[in-house]
Image (tube, coloured by chain):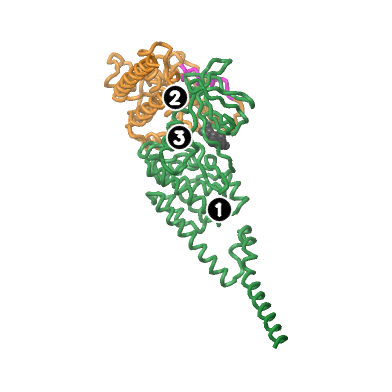
Chain colours: A orange, B green
């Protein structure tokens, strides 16, 4: 009995210290801003490097890659190319979803928010593993303590700063989906701007006429001013998703990202 | 909706008679059947120690945890049963695939969907339920939370006595934060009529949309100017007509608390009853009540009452008079 009590007491102690650690870690992250690329596409990449590999690289840099595959309503079967959607998100540490046009708005915000939670949970798990060994994770905690940790994760998801770079596949087949995409993005900004934390959005389309990506909207806190630029996006038949994700990666936090990338970065963008 | 997340656990289906035993608290639950399923996992009717309960289980551990956190805060709102009460929280390790699934056990709410109940019991219940809902919302808002995902699917009428209860608490959000979960038709952001910040007025907007849904079960499109669409629909729905001024205020976010809205709705209902009784006294034919069939059939015998009473008195008087004539 006595021994048990001592043991329990000690465990509790360890747990409390662990929590403090996690909070501190997350607090640091909060200052560092959550970064996401949101890729909206309707098909398979057909040019340049493997998008999954590029997504993995982005994730290494602290940017998670989410992918939404948009289906036309009449399509009954999923086009083959959309398998790639899941693969890119998996290696990009993000969330993916394939939807019909009509459900796009709600999906865009769910995916974004889920990805935020996922990233923050990832940090928690990493921390737990470091303290309690490689087998420990959020799911292994007793329900009550898991509840406490989830509360911290939620608090941070609400208050952290967020940067979302929207990357739109502007190949010919996307043309009639663009009005819906535009609406969904405005809706996304309504959702995210209800948060306590700050947001920044940027929109790029790909491929650009001569470069990998094309700037549609520079970093800005809101997306309500996009109606004028949107109709002009569409291009030919190629879909160089990999190079586009790579170019998008360099658009984040220019101040802090490796300076050596600067030149490359400028040369791979063209203004809309 | 199926989201792809990093951790991938096979989806779970439990069959009747299966037994779930908690990893931490060791309680055993026998599955009796499925009650429903949603975005997050499945809900089963179960039995433990001879008592029935509802068990929600999912491969998404963190979503279960979040819902449990909300249910726990509900338990703290004293003297008021807001959601189903929370009975147990635990994990279950699947004996075959070895994965751990999180679950919680809650009070089993046996009842009927709102629309079903109103169809079978009469329109007059709509007003009552609105008052109940506004009461509950007031309590919730006072304790610092907003329901968020208010929609018919998340409401159930238990009885007797009939009481509107909440089932899915997944959207419940602390005031001042961004709404955690919503459904477009009921969301003021979708209609361009406000933000997605958790404020009491967010729930009041959704409440009006719940009422709309009763008369437009297939919902309707928002059209080019969403606000106009709503106003037109409101104007065109006879059953909502009497509440129109309050509902417009709620749609436009002009109520800052449920109490204000409740006061106005109560006033409408009381007034209506007053005019009903006046009409009854004047014995005017129930023209306006033609649609309220339940009501008028119940009332018919009452209306004949004064007349029968008169006949009765007359008969007694006549009897006495006859006696008087005979014995005098
Ligand atoms: N406590 C309960 N009592 C009775 N039925 C319930 C209860 N909780 C949920 N249900 C049923 O299960 C369905 C799905 O549950 P819900 O919590 O809405 O799932 P989700 O959050 O995943 O959408 C509900 O629509 C309802 O029919």
* Dot 2 alpha-carbon crowd within 10 angstroms: few under 14, some 14 to 19, many 20 or more: many
Of labels 1 and 2, the one closer to you = 2
Q: Residue at x 62, y 24 (%)?
A: B18
Badge number at residue A64: none
For the residues beneath circles 1 and 2, the answer to whether they share a chain is: no
> Label 2, on which residue?
A143
Where is residue B182 shown, x and y percent of the image? 47, 37
Of labels 3 and 1, the one closer to you = 3
Q: Residue at x 48, y 24 (%)?
A: B61
Residue lying farthest top? A134
Mark 3 belongs to chain: B
Residue A256 relative to residue B98: left or right: left
Spatial distance from mark 1 to mark 2, Cα to Cα?
A: 40 Å
Q: Is residue B239 visible?
A: yes
Could you say whether the residue bearing mark 3 is in a helix, strand or loop? helix
Q: Which residues are magenta?
A: A78-90
Q: Is residue A142 above or below residue B39?
A: above
- Earlier sequence position, callout 3 versus callout 1: 3
- Tag 3–tag 1 contact (CB < 8 Å): no
Where is residue A69 shown, x and y percent of the image? 51, 26
> Label 1, on which residue?
B125
Spatial distance from mark 3 to mark 1, Cα to Cα?
A: 27 Å
* Dot 1 alpha-carbon crowd within 10 angstroms: few under 14, some 14 to 19, many 20 or more: some
């Amino acid at each position: 009995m006595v021994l048990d009590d001592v043991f329990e007491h000690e465990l509790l102690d360890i747990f409390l210290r662990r929590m403090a650690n996690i909070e501190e870690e997350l607090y640091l992250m909060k200052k560092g801003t959550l970064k996401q690329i949101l890729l909206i596409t309707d098909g398979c990449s057909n040019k340049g490097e493997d998008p999954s590999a590029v997504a993995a690289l982005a994730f290494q840099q602290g940017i998670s890659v989410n992918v939404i595959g948009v289906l036309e309503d009449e399509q009954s079967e999923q086009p083959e190319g959309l398998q790639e959607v899941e693969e890119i998100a998996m290696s990009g540490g993000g969330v993916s979803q394939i939807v019909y046009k009509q459900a796009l708005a709600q999906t865009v915000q769910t995916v974004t928010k889920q990805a935020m939670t996922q990233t923050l949970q990832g940090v928690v798990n990493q921390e737990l593993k470091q303290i309690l060994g490689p087998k420990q994770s959020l799911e292994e905690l007793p329900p009550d303590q898991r509840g406490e940790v989830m509360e911290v994760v939620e608090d941070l998801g609400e208050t952290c700063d967020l940067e979302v770079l929207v990357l739109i596949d502007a190949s010919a087949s996307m043309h009639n989906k663009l009005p819906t995409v535009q609406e969904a993005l405005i809706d996304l900004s309504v959702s995210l701007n209800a948060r306590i934390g700050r947001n920044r959005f940027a929109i790029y389309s790909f491929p650009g006429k001569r470069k990998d990506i094309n700037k549609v909207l520079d970093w800005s806190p809101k997306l309500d001013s996009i109606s004028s630029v949107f109709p002009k996006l569409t291009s030919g038949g190629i879909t160089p998703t990999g190079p586009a994700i790579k170019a998008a990666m360099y658009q984040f936090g220019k101040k802090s990202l490796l300076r050596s990338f600067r030149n490359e970065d400028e040369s791979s963008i063209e203004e809309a | 909706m199926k989201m792809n997340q990093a951790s991938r656990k096979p989806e779970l289906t439990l069959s009747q008679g299966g037994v779930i035993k908690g990893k931490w608290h060791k309680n055993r639950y026998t599955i009796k059947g499925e009650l429903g399923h949603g975005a997050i996992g499945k809900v089963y009717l179960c039995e433990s120690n001879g008592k029935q309960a509802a068990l929600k289980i999912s491969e998404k551990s963190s979503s279960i945890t979040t819902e449990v956190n909300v249910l726990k805060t509900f338990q703290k709102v004293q003297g008021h049963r807001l959601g189903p009460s929370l009975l147990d929280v635990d994990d279950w390790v699947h004996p075959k695939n070895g994965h751990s699934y999180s679950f919680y056990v809650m009070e089993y709410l046996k009842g009927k969907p709102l629309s079903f109940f109103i169809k079978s019991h009469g329109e007059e219940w709509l007003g009552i339920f609105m008052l109940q809902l506004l009461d509950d919302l007031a309590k919730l808002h006072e304790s610092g939370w907003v329901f968020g995902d208010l929609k018919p699917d998340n409401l159930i009428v238990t009885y007797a006595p009939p009481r509107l209860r909440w089932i899915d608490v997944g959207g419940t959000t602390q005031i001042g934060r961004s709404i955690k979960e919503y459904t477009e038709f009921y969301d003021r952001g979708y209609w361009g009529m406000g933000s997605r910040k958790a404020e009491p007025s967010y729930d009041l907007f959704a409440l009006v949309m719940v009422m709309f849904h009763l008369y437009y079960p297939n919902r309707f499109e928002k059209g080019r100017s969403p606000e106009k669409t709503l106003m037109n629909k409101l104007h065109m729905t006879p059953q909502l007509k009497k509440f129109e001024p309050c509902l417009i205020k709620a749609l436009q976010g002009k109520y800052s608390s449920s109490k204000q809205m409740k006061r106005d709705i109560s006033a409408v209902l009381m007034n209506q009853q007053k005019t009903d009784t006046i009409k009854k006294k004047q014995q005017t034919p129930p023209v306006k009540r033609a649609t309220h069939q339940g009501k008028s059939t119940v009332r018919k015998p009452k209306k004949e009452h004064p007349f029968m009473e008169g006949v009765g008195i007359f008969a007694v008087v006549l009897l006495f008079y006859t006696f008087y004539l005979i014995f005098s």
